[in-house]
Amino acid sequence: MARYTEADIQNALADIANEIAVTTAGTRHGVPRTTLRDRISGTQPYKNAHSNIQRLSPEQEEHLASWILRQEALNYAPTHAQVRAIATGVLKQAGDNRPLGKKWTSHFINRYLELKTKLGH
């Protein structure tokens, strides 16, 4: 599992823009050289790569992730079912009545690694 963040990637890319070698920048920020080369060649971040086929927009997902983190800060960890219910409610307000996929919650959590240990079951 990746142990670097989007901020680490952006910092490494900034180093590369300042004429630091890709390998050196990757080592300095803990980002694989291949990831940096992919980004330089135009590959999108994981969160954005398939946003056009995701049910919630990236902005809606960001708001949901922020809400989860706020709840956790208040010592209330929402369950997977509660997160799913909120996402379903957001979709219904937008006129989308199709059910979410079976693995939607786990895929959502994988897109927001900071949530991995925050949700109850």
Image: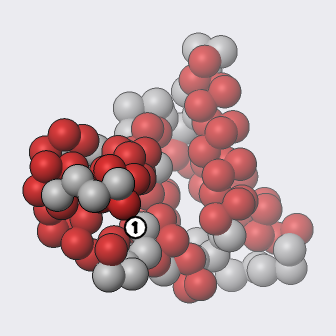
Spot occupied by residue 112 in the image (x, y as percentages of width and height):
46, 49
Spot occupied by residue 120 in the image (x, y as percentages of width and height):
47, 32
Question: Given the image, on which type of amino acid does mark 1 rest?
Answer: Tyr
| Residue in the picture at 26% in, 75% down | 38
Quarter of the figure with the C terminus: top left
Q: Is residue 5 left or right of residue 82?
A: left
Vertical position of residue 3 compared to residue 99: above or below: above
Spot occupied by residue 49 in the image (x, y as percentages of width and height):
45, 77
| Residue in the picture at 56% in, 85% down | 53
Spot occupied by residue 8 in the image (x, y as percentages of width and height):
35, 45
Coloration mode: secondary structure
Residue 9 makes an appearance in the image: no
Element under disc 1 = helix
Comparing 47 with 102, the one in front is: 47
- Quadrant of the image occupied by residue 33: bottom left
Q: Is residue 24 left or right of residue 51?
A: left
Comparing 14 with 112, the one in front is: 14
Vertical position of residue 118 compared to residue 35: above or below: above
| Residue in the picture at 38% in, 40% down | 116
* Marker count (numbered): 1
Dot 1 crowding, Cα within 10 Å, few <14, some 14–19, many 20+: few
Residue 10 makes an appearance in the image: yes
Q: Is residue 64 left or right of residue 35?
A: right
| Residue in the picture at 15% in, 68% down | 34
Q: Residue furthest front?
A: 19
Q: Which residue is mark 1?
A: 46
Vertical position of residue 2 compared to residue 101: above or below: above
